[in-house]
Image: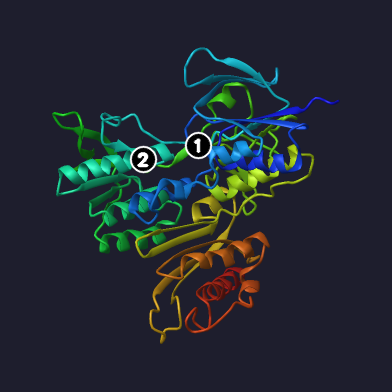
């Protein structure tokens, strides 16, 4: 009787457990032993939902968990919590494993290794950055610690002052969560405008809206230190120009691929530090090592370049591809167009494709078009303003990117542009898309199509010169 192969998974969240579950669907325990190693205490949870748990939209931590450790074990996946991998030996096909008890650890062999180590939040080496009251928001444990701190602060203080450092997706979502809890919130960001995933002109719209919501938004503000009081807890955040009082501080400075183990093992990394894989999500140069999720770089099919994009949507798809291939099937991951959507209070923010700076870096010439429209027919109750910016390639008119800032009904319109990018459509072709229309949902000309018309005119003008 043939001996079962062994699949070892490092990381028990989106990519890792998706890969393990898919492989188990295709291979029985007698054919494939699956061991998943997770250094934390949770698996298969939505990290993207943590700000909404903090803000009270999600009632309990358990609501964010798609599948519990017990449910994974019931499917014959040997899931080991509080277990850390400290070393990779790809030549020897083994990993060094240490459980919560400490010690040097033991070697564990594998036939297939899946690296799903995710990303680590940026935490600059500033004075006071590790003081009590300074919180990251990356894991379920982070979320629980922040909730406990909020409850202590709310019991001890009526002023409730919070500073969010960083105005990216996590920063603006946490600003909303804290506003909802009754805090006076200041957001600090060193960039020219918040949301550097947008061009500065669109980010400026976000800043203006946040200020109108009562969120003090300070841009061009590089944090220099976290000030502490006599009790050692945070009391303020300092920039080069000012100090901002704080009962607690939330860090939203973005993430970097967690690939220290892979780097030490000599596995190939890209410019951002993410692992490089082929289309099957196999680590380049390694037949039996796979990687996916926030620890890898992926192909941007608009620019043709490798990018690091940390999103749960991609991570789950990577896991499906990996699990299918290890399970004896065949699957590939073709790449991304860079679609993301977020909100702060009632403001919706979305983008897909390239920013102006990214298009320039890729060596592309382009034109832009920005329009202001409404989410519904102008005469229909509830119509709200919406700004749409579109980038198109010079001469060819190929769509390169779309950014949307608006109220209810704005954000998910970006999906139309994402499909157009995936199909390499021109902006002129987009103007003839047969989109749904009724006054409660859209003007006669949808805002995305209005932007496409304006972009088409810009391409024609550029071609005439």
Percent x, y for residue 325? Answer: 75, 40
Determine whether the residue tagged by mark 2 lies in a helix, strand or loop.
Answer: helix
Sequence-wise, which precedes: disc 1 or disc 2?
Answer: 1
The residue lying furthest to the bottom in this view is 379
What residue is shown with label 2?
144
Residue 437 vs 279, above or below: the answer is below
Contact between labelled residues 2 and 1, with CB atoms less than 8 Å apart: no
| The N terminus sits in image quarter | top right
Quarter-of-image position of residue 422: bottom right
Observer-nearest residue: 451 or 369?
451
Q: In which quarter of the image is the C terminus?
A: bottom right
Q: Where is residue 75 in the image (x, y as percent from the top left)?
A: 65, 39
Disc 1 and disc 2: Cα gap in Å? 19 Å
Left or right, residue 428 beside residue 123: right
Left or right of 183? Residue 428 is right
Q: Which residue is drawn at 57% across and 68% down?
A: 462
Viewer-side label of 1, 2: 2
Query: What is the crowding at mark 2: few (fewer than 14 residues within 10 Å), some, or many (at least 20)?
Result: some
**Residue 453 lies in quadrant:** bottom right
Other residues around mark 1 within 10 Å, as few (<14) / some (14–19) / many (≥20): some
Q: Residue 119 carries which label?
A: 1
Q: Which residue: 19% across, 28% down?
A: 232
Q: Is mark 1 on a helix, strand or loop?
A: strand
Q: Who is closer to the viewer here, 282 or 138?
A: 138
Is 75 placed above or below 450 here?
Answer: above
Q: Can residue 279 be seen in this view?
A: no
């Amino acid at each position: 009787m043939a001996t079962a192969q062994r699949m070892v998974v490092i990381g028990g969240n989106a990519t890792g457990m998706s890969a393990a579950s898919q492989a188990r669907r295709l291979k029985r325990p007698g054919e494939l032993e699956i061991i998943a190693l997770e250094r934390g205490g949770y698996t298969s949870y939505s990290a993207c939902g943590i700000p909404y748990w903090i803000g009270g939209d999600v009632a309990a931590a358990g609501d964010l968990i798609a599948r519990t450790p017990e449910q994974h074990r019931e499917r014959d996946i040997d899931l080991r919590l509080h277990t850390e991998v400290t070393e990779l030996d790809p030549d020897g096909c083994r990993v060094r494993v240490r459980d919560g008890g400490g010690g040097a650890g033991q070697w564990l062999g594998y036939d297939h290794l899946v690296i799903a180590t995710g990303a680590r939040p940026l935490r600059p080496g500033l004075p006071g950055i590790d003081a009590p009251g300074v919180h990251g928001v990356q894991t379920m444990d982070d979320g629980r610690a922040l909730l406990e701190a909020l409850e202590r602060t709310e019991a001890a203080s009526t002023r409730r002052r919070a500073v969010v450092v960083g105005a990216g997706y996590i920063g603006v979502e946490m600003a909303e969560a804290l506003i909802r809890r009754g805090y006076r919130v200041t957001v600090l960001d060193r960039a020219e405008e918040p949301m550097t995933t947008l061009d500065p002109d669109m980010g400026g719209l976000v800043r203006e809206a946040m200020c109108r919501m009562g969120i003090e938004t300070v841009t061009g503000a590089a944090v220099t230190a976290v000030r502490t009081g006599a009790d050692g807890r945070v009391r303020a955040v300092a920039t080069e120009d000012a100090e901002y009082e704080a009962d607690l501080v939330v860090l939203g400075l973005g993430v970097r691929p967690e690939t220290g183990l892979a780097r030490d093992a000599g596995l190939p990394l890209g410019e951002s530090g993410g692992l490089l894989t082929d289309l099957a999500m196999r680590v380049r140069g390694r037949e039996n090592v796979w990687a996916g999720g926030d620890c890898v770089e992926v192909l941007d099919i608009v620019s043709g370049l490798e990018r690091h994009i940390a999103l749960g949507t991609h991570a789950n798809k990577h896991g499906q591809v990996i699990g299918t291939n290890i399970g004896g099937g065949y699957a590939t991951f073709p790449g991304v167009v860079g679609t993301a959507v977020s909100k702060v209070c009632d403001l919706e923010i979305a983008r897909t494709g390239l920013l102006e700076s990214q298009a320039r870096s890729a060596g592309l010439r382009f034109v832009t078009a920005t329009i202001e429209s409404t989410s519904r027919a102008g005469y229909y109750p509830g119509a709200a303003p919406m700004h749409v910016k579109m980038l198109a390639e010079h001469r060819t008119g190929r769509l390169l990117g779309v950014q949307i800032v608006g109220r209810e009904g704005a954000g998910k319109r970006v999906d139309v542009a994402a499909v157009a990018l995936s199909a390499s459509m021109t902006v002129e072709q987009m103007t003839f898309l047969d989109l749904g229309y009724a006054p409660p949902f859209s003007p006669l000309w949808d805002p995305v199509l209005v932007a496409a018309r304006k972009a088409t005119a810009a391409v024609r003008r550029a071609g005439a010169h």
